[in-house]
């Protein structure tokens, strides 16, 4: 499924085949899943399948008379050989879907009929541990607890879970780079899975060569602990490449750059760590080479952070003029460094951008809008 995911983004990924063997494997796994799923699905239910991992369940569900919505959050605006290959793999399952939800209309393949296509971008939950208000002292405590910032060990590093209960960040991150960073130093942050398409290595290179020397700032590349995202087999490779690139930097650059792997044992504790890291950032970057939507962008904008991000995929729909900086060419390290250094040099401009960003996410990318859009879709299906 990672191979399908990469190709839907227009990248070849590991370069391996998507042929008969892969299809047999995919269908065998889904057949086992389907046997468990059908126990829960009643005759009136509508099943919403998410992403390529689950699409292959559609024919079996349709054969039982169940209505199926397939929601796909990945895609590219332009097709190439890789996207064609991924869509050829997925094509046999599409006809069994009653409706399709894509984050952007341009992601839908030709095989999706226009009258069944719904464009619904994702949203963020402002009451989740990831996005909930976190007072500045708690942000500072979490960053010291995980080992990113210097200072005395905090007595408590509290956060609130999605159900409203009180909790604490207790675990540490694995931080490559030695000593904790000085807490007062402006921090540039990218939070992503360790995935080539997120271009963590490009962020590292652009920051080392184009931002250090112009700004007193540090960089944290933050991702989940390797091996803890079950369907992401590339993470160890990407983190390894970033580690090698970090080791090859001069000592002065290494002193300012940290590679941070966050434990995933408790997903809400992990979310609270992400929340604190994003809130502490002077600039949040998302230098992706391809992006379905880019939740990290909405998350940072909600926290009123100035964002510097590639003008790819759903990021373009989120960053409106004045609410952040879009980079036309995601591979242009000079433009990336100029934009980041520019925001660091003008904190007032960054703060104003962040305030507008917060309002923009409030108006367009919270759960209420999302629910209304899904409400209309489900109402239409239920009435058909
Ligand atoms: N994320 C997280 N912990 C981490 C790294 C990432 O919770 O250690 C979250 C991040 O906050 C965001 C999601 O993973 O909510 C990534 O979604 P996005 O749309 O940005 O990219 P995707 O991973 O779906 O390609």
Image (cartoon, helix red, strand yellow):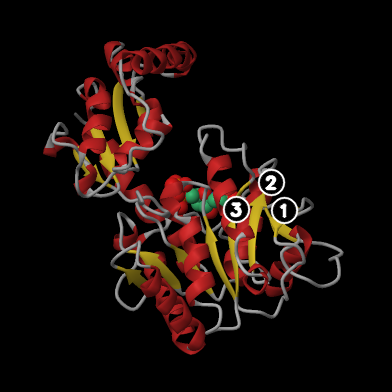
Q: Are marks 2 and 3 in contact (CB under 8 Å)?
A: no
Report the quarter where the N terminus lies: top left
Report the quarter where the C terminus lies: top left
Q: Nearer the viewer, mark 2 or mark 3?
A: 3
The residue at the point 37 percent across, 36 percent down is 5
Residue 324 showing in the rendered view: no
Q: Which of the 4 quarters of the picture holds residue 364?
A: bottom left
Give the residue at mark 3: 244
Q: 198 or 241: nearer the eye? A: 241
Picture layout, residue 15 above or below residue 217: above
Which is nearer the N-term, disc 2 or disc 1?
A: 1
Which is nearer the N-term, disc 1 or disc 3?
A: 1
| In the displayed structure image, the side of residue 55 where residue 36 appears, left or right | right
Task: State the SS at label 2.
Answer: loop
Question: How far, Cα to Cα, is label 2 from label 3?
Answer: 21 Å
Q: Are marks 1 and 3 in contact (CB under 8 Å)?
A: no
The picture places residue 171, in percent across and down from the top left corner, at 77, 50
Give the residue at mark 2: 263
The residue at the point 21 percent across, 34 percent down is 84
The residue at the point 41 percent across, 77 percent down is 339
Picture layout, residue 310 above or below residue 211: above
Please rate how many residues cluster around mark 2, counting C-alpha atoms within 10 Å: few if below 14, some from 14 to 19, many from 20.
many
Q: Do the residues labelled 2 and 1 touch (CB within 8 Å)?
A: yes
Give the residue at mark 1: 173
Please rate how many residues cluster around mark 1, counting C-alpha atoms within 10 Å: few if below 14, some from 14 to 19, many from 20.
many
Task: State the SS at label 3.
Answer: helix
């Amino acid at each position: 499924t990672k191979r399908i995911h990469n190709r839907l983004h227009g990248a070849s990924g590991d370069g391996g085949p998507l042929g008969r063997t892969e299809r047999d494997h995919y269908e065998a796994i889904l057949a086992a899943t389907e046997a468990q799923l059908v126990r829960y699905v009643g005759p009136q239910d509508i099943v919403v399948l998410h992403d390529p991992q689950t699409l292959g369940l559609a024919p079996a569900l349709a054969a039982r008379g169940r209505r199926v919505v397939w929601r796909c959050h990945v895609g590219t605006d332009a097709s190439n050989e890789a996207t064609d290959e991924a869509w050829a793999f997925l094509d046999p399952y599409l006809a069994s879907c009653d409706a399709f939800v894509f984050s952007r209309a341009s992601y839908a393949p030709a095989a999706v009929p226009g009258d069944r296509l719904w464009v619904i971008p994702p949203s963020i939950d402002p009451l989740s541990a990831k996005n909930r208000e976190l007072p500045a002292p708690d942000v500072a405590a979490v960053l010291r607890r995980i080992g990113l910032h210097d200072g005395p060990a905090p007595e408590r590093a509290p956060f609130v879970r999605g159900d409203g209960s009180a909790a604490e960040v207790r675990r540490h991150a694995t931080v490559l780079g030695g000593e904790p960073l000085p807490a007062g130093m402006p921090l540039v942050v990218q939070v992503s899975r360790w995935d080539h398409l997120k271009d963590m290595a490009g962020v590292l290179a652009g920051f080392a060569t184009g931002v250090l020397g112009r700004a007193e700032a540090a960089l944290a590349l933050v991702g989940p602990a390797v091996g803890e995202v079950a369907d992401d087999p590339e993470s160890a490779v990407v983190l390894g490449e970033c580690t090698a690139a970090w080791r090859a930097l001069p000592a002065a650059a290494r002193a300012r750059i940290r590679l941070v792997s966050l434990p995933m044992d408790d997903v809400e504790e992990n979310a609270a760590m992400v929340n604190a890291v994003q809130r502490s950032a002077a600039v949040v970057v998302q230098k992706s080479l391809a992006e379905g939507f880019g939740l990290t962008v909405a998350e940072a904008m909600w926290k009123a952070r100035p964002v510097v991000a590639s003008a790819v995929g759903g990021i373009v729909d989120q960053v409106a003029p004045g609410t952040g900086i879009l980079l036309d060419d995601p591979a242009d390290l000079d433009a990336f460094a100029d934009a980041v250094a520019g925001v660091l040099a003008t904190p007032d401009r960054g703060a104003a951008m962040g305030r507008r960003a917060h309002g923009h996410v409030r108006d367009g990318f919270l759960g209420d809008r999302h629910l209304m859009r899904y409400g209309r879709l489900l109402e239409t299906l239920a009435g058909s």
